[in-house]
Amino acid sequence: MTILCVTGCDARYFLTTLAFLRELEELSPRSRIRVCDFGMTDRQQAFLRDAGLLLERPAGLPADAHPYLCKGNLAGYCGAEEWSALLWLDSDMLLGALDPAALEALEADLCRSGAALAATGTIERASIARMMEGLRSAGHHVAPTLALLRDGGVDTGLPYISTGLMLWRSRELLADWGRACLDCPPQALLEQNVLNALAMRDPSSVLRLDARRWQVYDSALAGVEMPDPSNDRLLVLDGSPVMTVHASSRKGHHLDADLSLVMGGHVLKGYLRTFANPALQKRHLRNLLTVVNANRSAMEYIGVLQPC
């Protein structure tokens, strides 16, 4: 089994991604971790390139492409990489019970099912129709997605799938997703909407995972606990361990923080997408500070670590 672990980063999400790399290195060998360039600065790119982690922006992707569109074009970023399965994780996450054994077990389940990818539903178990109506009611332009759903004969009563955590087995569907995203007008949740319209034409192509176990986000984040002080990787919701938590919410359960932290004669400055849950936030910040301290010269050169 050759699992490639991939995330993505633009210039604003650089610190968030640094914190996440600390997590990924406990999940996979560094040689199997990659970061897609969604629009980083030259110095940010150079840091990740020198570390052997960077996936360059593919030809054909517009220079001003939104991260939604970049993410939908994973096939372009990963075309030269070797993998039996490709794990995508958003960079504003922490890992819980998702360890190498759990990841290999999920790949085995995916192979046995014959599905093209595994992905979670939404935390509230919303249908495609409910998600589309929610976006439309919020003033978002969803007509292109509704047309794709209609043209593909998709049953909109099916669960809406998330792109925050995905394990891919099919290069063909991955490439189809990229082409469809490039053809679709910009919109909220573009890559998610397009994936639902494409993959759910054949519901058996998706191994659907329970978000409350595999990708906890939104209001459920408030209920996540760390019951064992000696093991901060043990994240529990409703008495059961969870695989990952995701700093994504519509109800104030994540923070868009502008950091200004004094670190030994320097100040760490920059944006961090983090958690409102104090226990999760503490662990997240510890990850970030560990990576920054291990790479102080590079962080000074990039400009996120500045003299006091």
Image (spheres, rainbow, N blue to C red):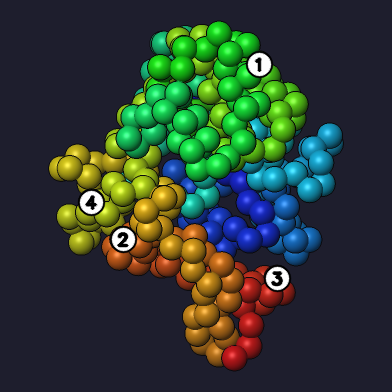
| Circle on res. 223 | 4
Considering depth in this image, is 211 or 153 the residue closer to the camera? 153
Rendered image quadrant of residue 31:
top right
Circle nearer the N terminus (2, 3): 2
Q: Which residue is mark 2?
A: 277
User: Of discs 4 and 1, which sits in the foreground?
Assistant: 4
Considering depth in this image, is 238 or 251 the residue closer to the camera? 251
Q: Is residue 224 above or below residue 130?
A: below
Circle nearer the N terminus (4, 3): 4
Between marks 4 and 3, how big is the CA–CA gap? 37 Å
Name the kind of residue labelled 1 in the image: Glu
Residue 37 image position (x, y, % from top left)? 70, 48
Circle nearer the N terminus (1, 3): 1
Numbered disc 3: secondary structure: helix
Q: Is residue 66 above or below residue 208?
A: below
Q: Which residue is mark 3?
A: 302
Residue 193 image position (x, y, % from top left)? 56, 29
85 vs 239, left or right, is right
User: Of discs 2 and 3, which sits in the foreground?
Assistant: 2
What residue do we see at 40% from left, 17% from top? 157
Circle nearer the N terminus (2, 4): 4
Residue 142 image position (x, y, % from top left)? 59, 31
Name the kind of residue labelled 2 in the image: Asn
What residue do we see at 75% from left, 44% from top? 65
Numbered disc 1: secondary structure: helix
Numbered disc 2: secondary structure: loop
Name the kind of residue labelled 3 in the image: Ile
Q: Is residue 39 above or below residue 143?
A: below
Name the kind of residue labelled 4 in the image: Gly
User: Of discs 2 and 1, which sits in the foreground?
Assistant: 2
